[in-house]
Image (spheres, grey):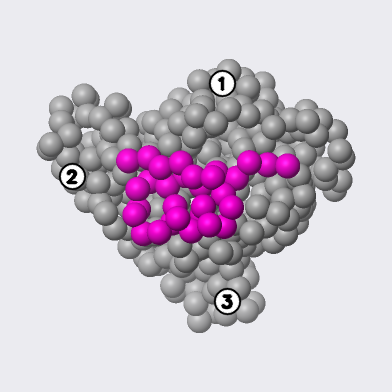
Amino acid sequence: MSETRTDVAPSGMAQDQTINVFVITYKATHLLPKCLPNLLNSTIKARIIVVNSSSNDGTVEMAQEMGAETFVVPRKSFNHALTRELARRTFPSDIAVMVTPDAFPTGPDVIEKLTAPIREGRAAVSYARQIPHVGAGFFEAFPREFNYPAVNEIRSIEDLKRYGAYTFYCSNSCSAWRNSALDAVGGFGVSLVSEDFIGVAKLLRNGEKIAYVGDAVVHHSHTYTLKQEFQRMFDTGYERYWQRHLLLDGVSEDARGKLFVKAMIARLWKERPVAIPYAIVQTGAKYIGYKLGFAAHKLPKSWIPKISSQDFYWGSEAFQKREAVEWNWHLAAAPSPASTGRPGSA
């Protein structure tokens, strides 16, 4: 059962465990000055490694100047899951922390607090609380408030009946993983998105637990257009279908979404009723995107890369490992990895 706690904090136990922090980047020169300092000055010993997917914009040089190690992968080899897997295997440690450069730690103790449940043997994976960036609007801030409350919690596979798909909720924007536990379930495999959810599902179904550490806090939020919301949820639905036996077997996936929409509309009704029509349209775009993505196996294959938000995936080596054989596509036939896209979190 879930274990709600108010004392998930570093206790000094198992301090000898090695920790590597991987900051996954692409065109992140504008983000590193806000992301790296509190990592480099961590209150617990950790190795900081900036992983860059060949953005060639000065990200690597800036990271080195700031004092971080760097690791460069070819853009065509980048994959949200496989790049993280490569990083943690290339740089072995007891604990692998995954961070995106647009997640700004609020203090030098974030890594210490984040890894405490793992170091203390209470969980195999943990993730941090996210609060919105300064100046974020309602539609950026409210999801953070809803999904990342100021509490600490331990969840296990026994919580599926209570939480449904939320049991596997996690974010690799700032998370920590016990490498031995990941090794036991085969690590991160190919995925379009949601490598964090998939990793957690593997671990929990293998008897492990996940910790949400509400006192390890990072600033992280995004402003998305309706098109981007649609595309992101298309990708989520697409991957959920691929991983349906792992993520959805005996799991309710709608309950959490309904709670979110209900809470959002209630808040808007009190504070900003004029925005309710937009909220309804946004919810519709996300819902349609998800359902279309989940049914993407019925669509013409040439449509899918055009709908997806992950333009680089469809010409990548990861695509070749998974979809290409089934689709009867070769790398030359697939779209080339884009050299542009949302900078920062590769």
| Residue on which disc 2 sits | 335
Query: Which residue appears at 78% of the width and 30% of the height?
Result: 16
- Residue 205 falls left or right of residue 152: left
Residue 53 percent across, percent down from the top left: 38, 46
Q: Which residues are magenta?
A: 45-74
- Residue 223 falls left or right of residue 5: left
- Residue 58 falls left or right of residue 222: left
Say which of 14 and 224 sits in front.
14
Q: Residue furthest front?
A: 65
The three-letter code of the residue at mark 3 reads Gly
Query: Which residue appears at 17% of the width and 39% of the height?
Result: 334
Residue 214 percent across, percent down from the top left: 74, 51
Residue 265 quadrant: bottom right
| Residue on which disc 1 sits | 183
| Residue on which disc 3 sits | 135
Find numbered disc 1 in the image and state the secondary structure of the residue it sits on: helix
Mark 3, other Cα within 10 Å: few <14 / some 14–19 / many ≥20 = few
Sequence-earlier tag: 1 or 3: 3
Residue 322 percent across, percent down from the top left: 30, 27
Query: Which residue appears at 58% of the width and 33% of the height?
Result: 200
The three-letter code of the residue at mark 1 reads Asp
